[in-house]
Amino acid sequence: MKTVYIIVEGQTEEKFVKDLLYDYFITFNICTIPIIFSTKREASGGKFKGGGVNFDKLKNEILKISQKNSLITTMIDYYGIDENFPGYKESLKLTNYQDKAKCIENEIAKINRNNFIPYIQMYEFEALIFSDIDKVEYINNERVLLNNLKSDVSIFNSPEEINNSKNTAPSKRLLQYYPNYKKTIDGIVILKEIGIDNIKSKCKHFSDWIDKIKIIGVLK
């Protein structure tokens, strides 16, 4: 059994790894373990988990985990990433979403650990839900709302193209029509209904990441 540690930003991504990726990868004899990245500490000294990602702290986390001699990867949203994050400013000059992600991933890869696979989620976790918007009916089956949401994103060729803005990011579009949407609950329920294989078929960058883990995880 191979172990893969996935550094994530918050509880939703943690549940995604535990509830979906674990079941998917275990069939390939790979065990995925999420680690919530601590962005800062509270005054009491306890860890505060979730929030914007600082590269220096992320690097330290990766180096610490790399000592376990297991495969390590990240699942970090492009949306809201620290503007001083390596490769971020350069990525803003690019138009293709995969080029943007790879621009940052290539910089993170310079940490230079052969058991590390960098991954940037375009543009945020909720983009995966748009792999099959019809499954949003599991939180609200109001067809008019669903049709409006589908029309709203019909201009995009891929869920991973849904853009990087405080008004139009994937989660903001969901909340516009479903203000009671809870990512830690509803998001996971919807994604379970969609399934990893269906997500892979619509989200190429995500799919490439999953396939890299399978290949490298089996080889190591």
Image (tube, rainbow, N blue to C red):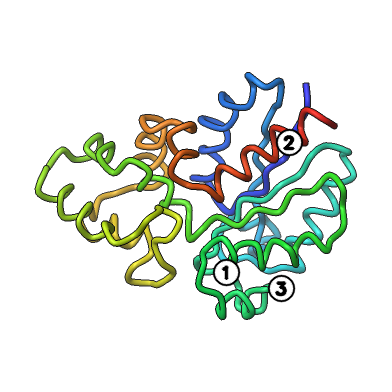
Specify which label sits upstream in the sequence, 3 or 2. Answer: 2
| Image quadrant where residue 105 sits | bottom right
| Callout 2: SS | strand
Residue type indicated by callout 2: Val
| Callout 1: SS | loop
Between 88 and 102, the residue placed more toward the observer is 102
Q: Which residue is mark 1?
A: 81
Q: Which residue is at a point 65% across and 40% down the rendered structure image? A: 34
Separation (CA) of disc 2 from disc 1: 23 Å
Residue type indicated by callout 3: Pro
- Point out residue 125 in the picture as x, y percentages from the top left corner: 47, 52
Separation (CA) of disc 3 from disc 2: 24 Å
Q: Which residue is mark 2?
A: 4
- Point out residue 136 in the picture as x, y percentages from the top left corner: 26, 41
**Label 3 environment density (alpha carbons within 10 Å; few <14, some 14–19, many ≥20):** some
Residue type indicated by callout 1: Ile
- In this image, 200 relative to 147: left or right? right
Q: Which residue is mark 3?
A: 86
| Image quadrant where residue 5 sits | top right
> Is the residue 91 above or below the residue 186 in the image?
below
Please state, as top left, top right, bottom left or bottom right, where the N terminus lies in the image: top right
Separation (CA) of disc 3 from disc 1: 10 Å
- Point out residue 110 in the picture as x, y percentages from the top left corner: 83, 63
